[in-house]
Amino acid sequence: MRLSAYFLPLLRENPSEAQIVSHRLMLRAGMIRQSSAGIYSWLPLGLRALKQVEQIVREEQDASGALEVLMPTIQPAELWQESGRYDDYGKEMLRITDRHERAMLYGPTNEEQITDIFRHSIKSYRDLPKNFYHIQWKFRDEVRPRFGVMRGREFLMKDAYSFDIDKRSAVTAYFKMFVAYMKTFKRMGLKPIPVRAETGPIGGDLSHEFHVQADTGESELYFDSDVVLLDENRIDPASLTVQDDIAGWYAATDEKHDPAEFETRVPEARRRHARGIEVGQIFYFGTKYSKPMGAVVVGPGDEPIPVEMGSYGIGVSRLVGAIIEAGHDDAGIIWPESVAPFRLGLVNLRAGDARCIAAADELYAKLCAAGIETLYDDRDESPGAKFAAMDLIGLPYQLVVGPRGIDKGVVELKERGTGKRQELSPEAALNRLGAK
Amino acid sequence: MRLSAYFLPLLRENPSEAQIVSHRLMLRAGMIRQSSAGIYSWLPLGLRALKQVEQIVREEQDASGALEVLMPTIQPAELWQESGRYDDYGKEMLRITDRHERAMLYGPTNEEQITDIFRHSIKSYRDLPKNFYHIQWKFRDEVRPRFGVMRGREFLMKDAYSFDIDKRSAVTAYFKMFVAYMKTFKRMGLKPIPVRAETGPIGGDLSHEFHVQADTGESELYFDSDVVLLDENRIDPASLTVQDDIAGWYAATDEKHDPAEFETRVPEARRRHARGIEVGQIFYFGTKYSKPMGAVVVGPGDEPIPVEMGSYGIGVSRLVGAIIEAGHDDAGIIWPESVAPFRLGLVNLRAGDARCIAAADELYAKLCAAGIETLYDDRDESPGAKFAAMDLIGLPYQLVVGPRGIDKGVVELKERGTGKRQELSPEAALNRLGAK
C-alpha cells in the first residue's frame, strides 16, 4: 500500500484524553478515532491489526473443534427474562424498544441466545459434545468508559459456548478451551497469566481469567512467578477436574486471593502482586442456563438430561490495546509479527529523486509480488518525519532507500523491536525478508 | 469437516413462515435461524456462505482502490442532527437512549459518520480523492420484515463513501464503483441489471440500482433485454458524465421509468418488464453532507472547497438470499463455486462398512491436504437421506463412496448444477477436483 494513497492520520501531539499508553499510541498512529464515549471507529491501520488478532482467535477456536456461528447484536428481551438475567443485569445492558414497542437489547453476551439455538435443534446426547463460537460486536454501557479500546462500550468479543452430556465431559471442554486460550495469546507474542477468578454475573463453579501483565491493568493479581512456565502443550484436558489447579502454581485475582495459601504454597522470592489486563475469561456453570431454558437432550437410557454448559470469552478489540501495552517504547508501537498491520515499512527518503523513486518502486513491486504486506512511504516529507512515523506505527521491519545508499548499492534494513540496522544489497534485503 | 461433528440442523418440512424460495431453503438447509422478527443467527453453513460473499465484495472494493475502515454500529444522534436527517429518517431508525440519557441510534447507514471522520483528518485537496468502505451490521426497523435475510432488520451491508475535489472527479469515482459492482456480482454467478434509480433518503442527482431478476423481487424494472450485454471491462469511468447513460441501453426502476422514452428507444421485442431484487445501489450527491457538516478542504488556490461525495451500498447478507433465488431447483440450492460454503460434499453411503469408511476417510484426508473445502457425510443415515441432504445444501460437487463402487474400484462424482454423474477411479476423481 502506498502511503500517499492511504489514510493514516498521525497525531504529532499526545492527545490529552488518553491516560494510558496504548490509547495514546492508537490515537497517534491513526488506528482509531472516537465516535462517542467508549465507541470507536477503526481506521485502516487499526482495522488491519484488529483483523490479524481476530484471525488468530478464529484459527485457534477452529483448531479446538469449536464451530463458528454468528448471532445478531440485537436480542429479544424475552430470552433474558427466561434465564432470569434481564432484571439482574442492570444499567450496563443497553435496552432498546423497537417501533412495535417490543423490548430488545444490544447483547452484552450470548448465553441465552445460543441456548435458544441449541434447544431448538439438538435433541440427543449423540449430538454432543458441541462448542459454538462467534466473533461479534457487543455493547456494555459502562458508566465511565475509558482507556480507549480497553474499556469501551462497543467492543468486539469472541464468545464460545460448550454443551456436554455430563460434568466430566463439560470440564474437559473447559480445559480444552483453556489450552486454546494459552495458544491464542502466545501466538500474539503475549505472556498470558491464567488466574483463578470469580464467576460474576455469568455464574458457575469454575472460572479462569487470562491476563497480560501491565501497570495500567485494572485487575489485581497474586501469583507464583513460575506460572509463566506453564506449557499448555503438556496439559491433558481430559485428565483434569474442577478441583485441579491447572497451573500447578498459585495464581488468583484479588477476589479469589487466599493470603494464607499464598504464603504456604509459594516461596517468598516467587510471590508476585501485580496488575493485569484481562484479555479472556472462561466459565464452567453447569446447568445454570440449560435448566431454566429447557436445553435438554435425551440420554442413552431415554431419560431427559439438561446439558452441562460453559462459556469462553476473548476481548478481541481489547487485545489490540493489550498487545500495545505489552510492546512499545518511547518512539511508538512495537508489533509482534503475527499481528502487525503490515510486515514491512518501505521508506523512500527522497521523494523527489528519480533514482530513489526507481529503486523504491522496484523493491515495492518485488515485495508485493512476494506477498509481503508492505506500507510504502512514498510521500514528500522529511526523512525525520518518515522515520518518526515508521517508529510510531511500529511495523516489524523498515527498509530504507536513500541517495547515499544507492551510490553504494545498498539499502538499510531495520528491525523495529531491536533497533538493529544493517546495510544490505536490495537483493540480500529481499532475501532476508523471505521475498526471494 | 465431518458432518457428524458439524451442526447442520436440516428441516424436512417447508417452514410455514417462509414465503419465498431462498428463505425456505436457507431455513431447511440449516443456514439461519430466526432470533426475532427480521433478525437472524447465521448457523455454520450459512455463515460460510456469508463470508464467501463478503470476501468477494471486499476484494473488489480493495481492487477499486477503496480503503477499508470499520465504523461502530451505535452512533450519536448529534451527527444526524447536523446533517438534518435525524428527524427525517422516521421510524426505520432504531433510536436508543444510553444510561446517561444521551440520544444514540443504531446506524442504518453511515454518511454522517464517515463525513465526521473525514472533516477531522483531511484538510487539503492533495489528499483527494479518497474512498472509504466498511462492512458492518446495520439496523433498519422495517414495519414488516419478511423474506428472511432479504428484508431483515439487522443486516450486513458494505457501504463505501467517496470524497473528491470536484464534480468531474466525483463522477469518475461513481462510475469506478459502478464497474466494481458489476465485477462483484458477476463473480458471484449473478447477472446484474443496472438501472437508473431514485436517490430517496440518501439524496443527490444520480443513482443506479443493481438488480437480480427474480419473480419474488420487490422492485419493478423496465429494461432493454440487451442490457445484459453490458461489459464493465469496456467502461472508462473517467470518460462518463452524469448525463451519460452508462449502459447505452434503457433500464430504469418504475419510479424512474419513462414509457415514452422506453418505446422510442427500445424495439418492442427487447422491452422487458420484470421484477428484481436490489442487491446494490450507488449515489452521487455532491455536497449534500459536506456543506452542512463542514467537510471542507483547502484547494490549490488556498480557497475552501466543500468536498463532492457519493455513497455506495451492497447488501451483503441479502446477497446470500439473492444468489439462492437465482440458483436452485426443486431439490434445493445450487451454489456457484465462488460462494459455495464448501466446494464438495463427500458421502459415505454405508457408515457401518469398514471398506467404505476406509475409502472415504482416505479420500477425505487427501481432499483436506489439497485444501479442498469438503463436508464429509460420515453419519449413519440412509443413502436416500444423504443424497437429499446434499442436494438440499447444494454444494457444487458430490463425491459418493459406496460398496458397489468399491467392488468396481470407482467412486461417483456428481455435479450439482447439471446433475451429471460420472464413475471414476478415486485418483481420477481427485484429479478432476484439482486435488492432485
Image (cartoon, coloured by chain):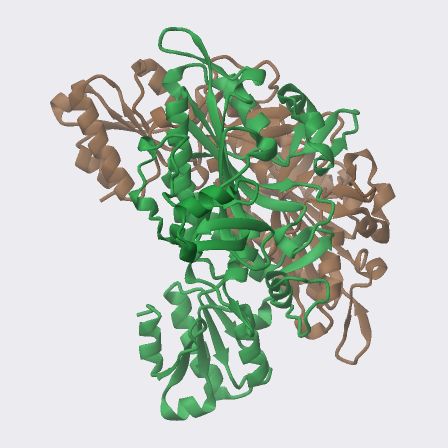
Chain colours: A brown, B green
Q: Position of residue A4 (x, y in %)?
A: 34, 24
Residue for point 43% across, 20% down: A331
- State which quadrant residue B180 falls in: top left
The answer to whether residue B136 is above or below residue B101 is below
Query: Which residue occupies the foreground of this view, A331 or A102?
Result: A102
Query: Which residue occupies the foreground of this view, B29 or A311?
Result: B29
- State which quadrant residue B336 falls in: bottom left
Query: Which residue occupies the foreground of this view, A201 or B199?
Result: B199
Residue for point 36% across, 27% down: A5
Q: Residue furthest top?
A: B302
Q: Position of residue B23 (x, y in %)?
A: 63, 61
Q: Is residue B99 left or right of residue B304?
A: right
Q: Is residue A13 left or right of residue B5?
A: left
Q: Position of residue B383 (x, y in %)?
A: 55, 84
Residue for point 54% across, 16% down: B291
The answer to whether residue B55 is above or below residue B293 is below
Q: Position of residue A396 (x, y in %)?
A: 38, 33
Residue for point 34% across, 19% down: A386
